[in-house]
Image (spheres, rainbow, N blue to C red):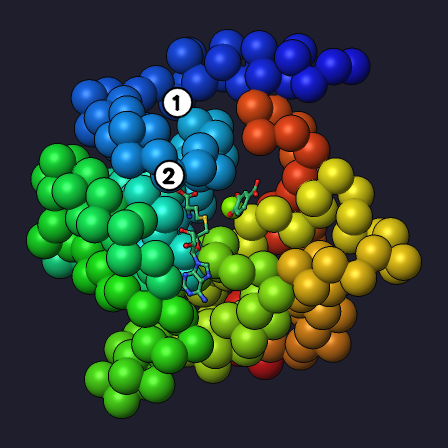
Amino acid sequence: MSEARWAEVDSYVSELLAPHDRALDGALAASEAAGIPAIQVSPPQGKLLNILARTIGAKTILEFGTLAGYSTIWLARALPEDGRLVTLEAEPAHAEVAAANIANAGLEGLVDLRVGRAQDLLPQLAAERVGPFDLTFIDADKASSPEYLAWALDRSRPGSLIVADNVVRDGQLVDLSDEDPAIAGQRALHEMLAAEPRASATTIQTVGAKGYDGFTVALVSGR
Ligand code: SAH
Ligand code: DHB
Ligand code: MG
């Protein structure tokens, strides 16, 4: 099965079930115009994030890695009027485009976009006593995924979800000779979850417009 076919099926699903409106189209156009790499989640994945957030009635969301705000828009659209999404982005040029995209989607009142490396922003968030978060989406520098998972676990409640993107990366996940720190981070995330009594998790492999990859979903039980 070819990658072209995976992308065709993604288009089919997107058109029927995850159609773009002007804000989502505009976000991708602005991202491309700014020369930002098109590494955002696919439309079906964005819709999945939106459905997961609505399923648990999420009112507070934390996102690691905003890029141009595409996943942010899908997630923030799941929030009620008094909801809040905190999203962390290291690259000022990405954050600038994201802020405009989020405003263009009419979501600026729900989204708190912070610019800096997540590692450096977390102490301030902790000092503000933000959270607990109903849903956390981990999608920044993959080498730091374990650190972000640990932080999110400490700021989750029973019933919270933690989702991580890019955990399979063409199967690199199981190639132990591969020393890429990004994939080492995703392996460590799996090992942490395996040993974590407070969460129950699984990983679903995905193919589509973004190639062969995967999503980890963890349900926090609080035990
Ligand atoms: N969630 C986005 C895609 C994020 S791509 C979407 O699906 O639409 C990963 C992003 O993480 C990039 O914008 C990159 O600049 C950012 N990033 C990388 N290292 C980071 C760090 N240490 N802290 C915060 N953001 C980081
Ligand atoms: C890439 C894809 C992503 O979804 C991401 O969050 C970071 C990088 C990539 O294809 O390089
Ligand atoms: Mg990603």
| Closer-to-camera residue (67/91) | 91
Location of residue 180 by image quarter? bottom right
Q: Tell me if mark 1 has few (under 14), some (14-19) or many (20+) residues whose alpha carbon lies within 10 angstroms of its own.
A: some
> Is 97 left, or right, of 168 in this rendering?
left
> Is 215 left, or right, of 157 in this rendering?
right
Answer above or below: position of 5 versus 93.
above
The amino acid type, in three-letter code, at marker 2 is: Ile
Q: Residue at x 65, y 29 (%)?
A: 211
Residue 115 placement (x, y as % from top left): 27, 64
| Closer-to-camera residue (105/182) | 182
Q: Secondary structure at mark 1?
A: loop
| Closer-to-camera residue (135/70) | 70
Count up the numbered dots.
2
- Label ID, residue 41: none
> Is 46 left, or right, of 86 in this rendering?
right
Residue extending furthest toward the right: 177
Location of residue 9 by image quarter? top right
Which residue is the site of mark 1?
Answer: 18
Which residue is the site of mark 2?
Answer: 36
Answer above or below: position of 74 versus 3.
below
Q: Residue at x 12, y 50 (%)?
A: 108
Residue extending furthest toward the bottom: 127
Measure how far apart labels 1 and 2 are at the Cα level: 23 Å
- Ligand 1 within 8 Å of disc 2? The answer is yes
Q: Earlier in the sequence, mark 1 or mark 2?
A: 1
From where the camera sits, is residue 60 visible?
no
The amino acid type, in three-letter code, at marker 1 is: Ala
Q: Residue at x 41, y 12 (%)?
A: 15
The image quadrant in which ligand 1 is located: bottom left
Q: Nearer the viewer, mark 1 or mark 2?
A: 2
Residue 142 placement (x, y as % from top left): 58, 60
State the quadrant of the N terminus.
top right
